[in-house]
Amino acid sequence: MTIPPSQLRQELAAVFGEITAARRLAAAGRDVELENLDGRIDALCTAILDLPREEGRDLLPLLEDLRSSLNQLAATIRVGLSGAATSS
């Protein structure tokens, strides 16, 4: 069953919220649980691939924003890890 693009947009918005929360936690030096996030993103990408081509293309800007947000999260975590390594 194909998930409607409007529902996928809502799910993407929820994932963006989780990424923002994870960045805040990481910036504060707290542990961040990413396993659930990984599964949700995987399911979203699979659902988007199941859409008709044009509907999937309409979501491309959001996927690019998602990649950027994940890269920012990774950078925040790296900074935190490098800071923890130098203070040990």
Image: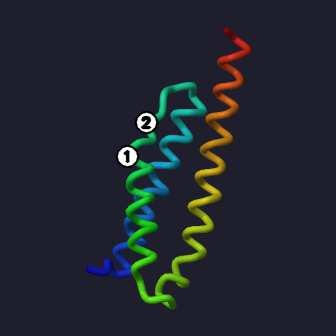
Vertical order, 79 against 61 (above or below): above
**Mark 2 Cα shell of 10 Å, populated few (<14), some (14-19), many (≥20):** few
Instruction: Using the rendered view, name the quadrant where residue 85 is placed.
Output: top right
Q: Which residue is mark 1?
A: 36
Label 2 – label 1 distance at C-alpha: 7 Å
Q: Position of residue 22 (x, y in %)?
A: 50, 41
Q: Which mark is residue 62?
A: none
Report whether 78 appears left or right of 20: right
Describe the element under mark 1 as helix, strand or loop: helix
Residue at (49%, 57%) from the top-left corner? 16
Mark count: 2
Q: Which residue is mark 2?
A: 33
Image quarter hosting the C terminus: top right
**Mark 1 Cα shell of 10 Å, populated few (<14), some (14-19), many (≥20):** few
Q: Identify the residue at the far top of this view.
A: 88
Vertical order, 58 against 61 (above or below): below
Vertical order, 57 against 74 (above or below): below
Residue at (50%, 49%) from the top-left corner? 19
Q: Are marks 2 and 1 in contact (CB under 8 Å)?
A: yes
Report whether 72 appears left or right of 17: right
Describe the element under mark 2 as helix, strand or loop: loop
- Amino acid at pointer 1: Asn
Residue at (65%, 28%) from the top-left corner? 80
Image quarter hosting the N terminus: bottom left
Q: Identify the residue at the far left of this view.
A: 1
Instruction: Using the rendered view, name the quadrant where residue 51 is placed.
Output: bottom left
- Amino acid at pointer 2: Glu
Q: Position of residue 69 (x, y in %)?
A: 60, 54
Q: Position of residue 30 (x, y in %)?
A: 51, 26
Residue at (56%, 61%) from the top-left corner? 66
Vertical order, 37 against 65 (above or below): above
